[in-house]
Image: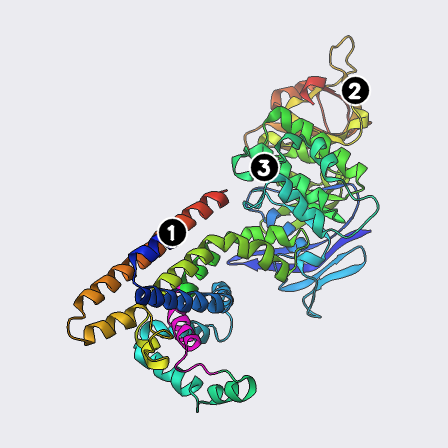
Amino acid sequence: MARDMVRAMLTPEEMQILATSLGVAGRAVLFSLPVAIAFAWALSRPKFPGKWIVDAVAHLPLVLPPVLVGYFLLLLFGVRGPVGSWLRETFGIQLAFTAEGAALATAVMAFPLMVRAIRLSFEATDRGLFEAAAVLRAGPWDRFWSMALPLAWPGVLAGAVTAFAAGLGEFGAVITFASNVEGQTQTLPLAIYSALQVPDGDATAMRLAAISMTAAVTGLVLAELLQQWARRRLEA
Amino acid sequence: MSLKLSEAVVRRGAFRLTADFEIPADGISVVFGPSGAGKSMLLAMIAGLHKLETGRVEFNGAVLEDAGAKTRVGAHARGIGLVFQDARLFPHRTVRGNLQYAERRRPAARNAPIVVDIARRLEIEPLLDRPVRNLSGGERSRVALARAIVSAPEMLLLDEPFAALDGRRRRAFVTLMRDLSREQSLPMMIVTHQVEEAAELADHVVAVKAGRVIASGAAADAMQRPDFADLLDRRDIGARVDTGAVAGGQGGGVWVRADSVLLAAEEPRGISARNVWRGSVVAIDREVDGAVLVSLDTDAGYIRSRITPEALSDLRLETGATAWAVVKSNAL
């Protein structure tokens, strides 16, 4: 029903753009979430050698210009890049200038947001509960799966939804690495940009901007609601 | 079967705990000492939650940790349970979920305790499907204890398990602890700073003061030593008497405060008090405020009585003299 309503309001082109955006942001979150959880867990631990490097790597996309991130990805994963050429020869996968590439660029940009939210959640967990689990015979891995992760669930959820909402709007890294291919890598912000490039594109841009805003705000509200619900559930 | 700590040292910030003792791993051992002495830290050390700086911990002949040899069995692999003072129930699980967490991780054994039985025993059966956030302090303690017992450890450490309970419940709980320890053949090590509780529960005592284990051994011996008296408030000074020697008592011990003991120079007759013990005076100590502490060696064991200097001269008590110690049953 919701789908029919959306369909009634949007043109086929707009539907296509929205679908591309949702697909790119969704895949970006899906693939980077496990990595983000691993980074967040490592960073929430007491000091270990090389922690500052992990910290810096996790936060780099936050401070680098997005275009630069896209450029680095191109150097690394581009058709002639070391990883890109290997992927192509071994698996026949091409990332640059594809929807998968757009997802990768989005994932990298949204990564710090996710790590931050999840890390805060890990850090807020009562360490005493891990000790209690340990004396009930739960080993380190067991404690991670049975204690740390379920207790940090609100943060993981909020991190994922926030990253998804932010991912819908990623521009610089995506256009540099995946380019602006209609129907493939053209997400909402890229479509708005394109619309603004043509004379009389204002109306189109306006409609796309409204869609973009709606999607982003929905994501934020959803994140907040999920987090409140999860917190209530865990209150001791 | 014993628990042995050899020059074991852990440090947390500026606080340092040194432990060097061996106690049999059976019955109930009480860790006794004033607040801040390091009692909880001692339990954490044994359970493997704090890493040793130096020294060694052995349990039933197996080395759990040896700082010198850099061997260390993790807390999860020691088979030693610990009930924390603040219960530490898992907030994302129900009461039953908390118990099942322990049940799923225990090694398979023929006579492992059954969740429902333990729950019934600790009167938490009606709570099983409740989330843990709505439980009262006393309920939380009982769930934490049930969870630890369900995990079927080889030894169970308990940090002030009675703290959240009111007087009546507390006494019932003390009895329950003794029963559970016996029924499950589960050696327990219980932290308390209440001397009555210590006397009532302890088969063995580990006395801790200012970051150091100062005495350990059978309750009857350890609680009689002069350095044990150093751990007590003035009003708690007294002696442990085997309950077998007390009118109406069974098993364990009881703490007899020096303030509740009367002395008589001749055998009292026609008296309501149920406990009259003959003994000889072994020590007469003057306290700072002038009161006199008389120690008797009686049939019931060592007894202390606090009397005034006037009473001392009236009774003409001196070391070696015979005297009778009189204690009302209600004072025990």
* Residue ranking furthest to the top: B270
Q: Which residues are magenta?
A: A94-113
In the depicted structure, whether residue A214 falls above or below residue B164: below
Residue identifier under label 3: B140
* Residue A99 belongs to the span the image colors magenta: yes
What residue type is disc 3 on?
Arg
Task: Kindly indicate whether the residues beneath marks 1 and 3 are on one polypeptide chain.
Answer: no
Instruction: From the viewer's perspective, tell me whether residue B286 is left or right of residue B254.
Output: left
Q: Nearer the viewer, residue A13 or A179?
A: A13
Q: The disc labelled 1 sits on which kind of residue?
A: Ala
Which numbered circle lies on residue B248? 2
Between A199 and B322, the residue placed more toward the observer is A199
Q: Which mark is in front, 1 or 3? A: 1
* Numbered disc 1: secondary structure: helix
Tell me if A199 is positioned left or right of B100 in this view. left
Q: Are marks 1 and 2 on the same chain?
A: no
Query: What label does residue A2 carry, if any?
Result: 1
Q: Quadrant of the C terminus of chain B?
A: top right
Q: Mark 3, residues whose alpha carbon is within 10 Å: few (<14), some, or many (≥20)? A: many
Left or right for A182, reference B191: left
Q: Chain of mark 1?
A: A
In the rendered structure, does residue B38 fall within the stretch colored magenta?
no
Give the chain of mark 2.
Answer: B
Q: Residue furthest right?
A: B110
Q: Residue at x 62, y 34 (%)?
A: B162
Q: Can residue B215 be seen here?
A: no
Do the numbered discs 1 and 3 sit on residues whose CB atoms are within 8 Å? no
Tell me the SS state at disc 2.
loop
Q: What secondary structure prevails in the magenta region?
A: helix
